Amino acid sequence: MVLSISSTCTLEEVAACCNAVRFFQLCVYKRRDITAKLVQRAENNGYKAIVLTGDSPRHGRREADIKNKIIIPELKNVEGLLSTKIVTDKGSNLDALANQTRDPSFTWEDIGWLKSITKLPILIKGVLTHEDALKALEVGAAGIIVSNHGGRQLDYCPPTISVLEEVVHAVGGKVPVFLDGGVRRGTDIFKAMALGAQAVLVGRPVLYGLAAKGENGVRRVLEMLKEELELTMALSGCSNVKEITRSHVRTKHDRQLLSLL
């Protein structure tokens, strides 16, 4: 599980009630001392990795949030460290808070600073290109998450499944590559693994299950994805995940190549 920095439960509360493998998702604040304290708390509470959000130097223009005048709840992880009571007449409280508190100057070079304050491996989330994948390796990322932030940061970003293979080829097996975004069925997981992902991240389906039936809804969503993946594997002749290969999928690029033959 990847716990959001914006969670309404503290990372300590989650650690106390869950013995699963946990990662902590981090956005870097202008006040680096706050960022450092959050990282130290994650490390002290048994989180296994830091997931650095790399695609949000500024907050994307989320027009629904502006129209609805979204007001975010109290962010428990920064309680006592950072004031989240932002008054704005521009519509989105979330947008104003992000732009006032997050550090837009954070660059690839600053990942060295992040590595210096923790022993935890750092995964970079938000990579969509061959070039950025190579840069992530260069700065010492322990893993890469191919993500477009749920399509909420920048209009016309490519679907993550369409650029996954490009990133996988760039990485060349040096670090794990995960896919985030658009996973709704077990067949989506199968496709991602066939294109080289070691695992997928699931966001919205979990929230839908939570909204519909609470904890049992979340459990059922995960069970459905697992059941659908196993069925897809069986019907594709795969008895385990290691047997899922590139030959099991055909992409638009593949079809274009075939048309030239």
Image (tube, rainbow, N blue to C red):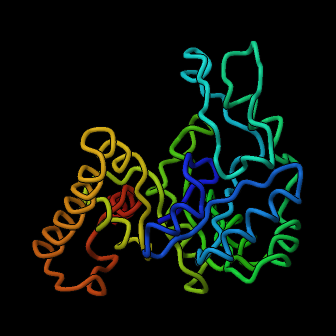
Give the quadrant of the C terminus: bottom left
User: Where is residue 216 shown, x and y percent of the image?
Assistant: 24, 53
- Identity of the residue drawn at 66% across and 66% down: 124
Judging depth in this view, the residue of 108 and 32 nearest the camera is 32
User: Where is residue 243 shown, x and y percent of the image?
Assistant: 26, 86
- Identity of the residue drawn at 70% across and 76% down: 141
Judging depth in this view, the residue of 47 and 166 nearest the camera is 47
- Residue occupying the far left of the picture: 235
Judging depth in this view, the residue of 52 and 192 nearest the camera is 52
Note whether 174 is above or below 136 in the view shown. below
Judging depth in this view, the residue of 1 and 202 nearest the camera is 1
Total marks drawn? 0
- Identity of the residue drawn at 51% across and 62% down: 14
User: Where is residue 55 shown, x and y percent of the image?
Assistant: 68, 51
Q: Is residue 196 visible?
A: no
Q: Is residue 10 left or right of residue 164?
A: right
- Identity of the residue drawn at 37% across and 55% down: 252
Q: Is residue 101 visible?
A: yes
User: Where is residue 19 shown, x and y percent of the image?
Assistant: 43, 75
Q: Is residue 133 left or right of residue 156?
A: right
Q: Is residue 215 left or right of residue 124?
A: left
